[in-house]
Image (cartoon, rainbow, N blue to C red):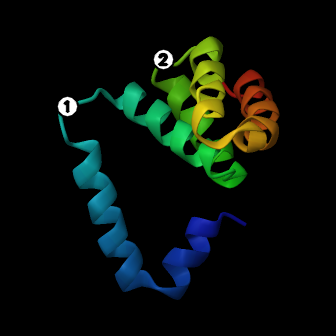
Amino acid sequence: MNPLDVFQKESPEVATAFNGLIEALKNTTGLDAKTKQLVYIGIKSALGDTTAVYYHVPMAKKLGASRDEIKDTILITLTVCGLKGVATCLPLALEVYDKSE
């Protein structure tokens, strides 16, 4: 089950507010949508958040991110958190990328 579905079901008011924040961030103009996804994947990889990486890699791919861009986004986390993000997220990210449309 998608964890965001549980969030929506169990706390609809909070989820609605959160979704509003996400929409507002999507509509900022400093970075294009693909770059925002890559930044998000990098942050979540640094935290070892495989669930977020699983869902956001296909989004980035649909926005035009290449496999190498995904790979470099995760590899750069080595400088801030060591091997954790690479070891936990890189294999998953590349597998998801290769399987997504």
Query: Which quadrant of the figure has residue 94?
Result: top right
Q: Is residue 45 left or right of residue 95?
A: left
Q: Residues within 10 Å of mark 1 (few under 14, many from 20)?
A: few
Q: Is residue 6 above or below residue 36?
A: below
Query: Is the N terminus in the top left, top right, bottom left or bottom right quadrant?
Result: bottom right
Residue at point 64%, 43% (across, down): 81
Which amino acid does the dot numbered 2 rest on?
A: Gly
Location of the C terminus (image quadrant): top right
Q: Where in the figure is residue 38, as x and y percent of width and height?
A: 48, 31
Alpha-carbon distance for marks 1 and 2? 18 Å
Query: Where is residue 83 shown, x and y percent of the image?
Result: 76, 38
Badge 2: residue crowd in 10 Å (few <14, some 14–19, many ≥20): few
Q: Residue at x 19, y 41 (%)?
A: 28
Does dot 2 land on a helix, a strand or a loop?
Answer: loop
Image quadrant where residue 45 sits: top right
Q: Is residue 2 above or below residue 78?
A: below
Measured from the top left, where is residue 92 in percent x and y? 79, 37
The disc at residue 30 is 1
Which residue, given by chain and number where applicable, does mark 2 sit on?
64
Residue situated in front as seen by the camera: 26 or 62:
26
Which residue is painted at 55% across and 39% down in the image?
41
- Kind of residue sitting beneath label 1: Gly
Q: Nearer the viewer, mark 1 or mark 2?
A: 1
Nearest the camera: 8 or 44?
Answer: 44
Task: Give the quadrant of residue 6.
Answer: bottom right
Q: Earlier in the sequence, mark 1 or mark 2?
A: 1
- Looking at the image, residue 39 sits to the left or right of residue 87; the answer is left
At 30% across and 73% down in the image, what residue appears? 17
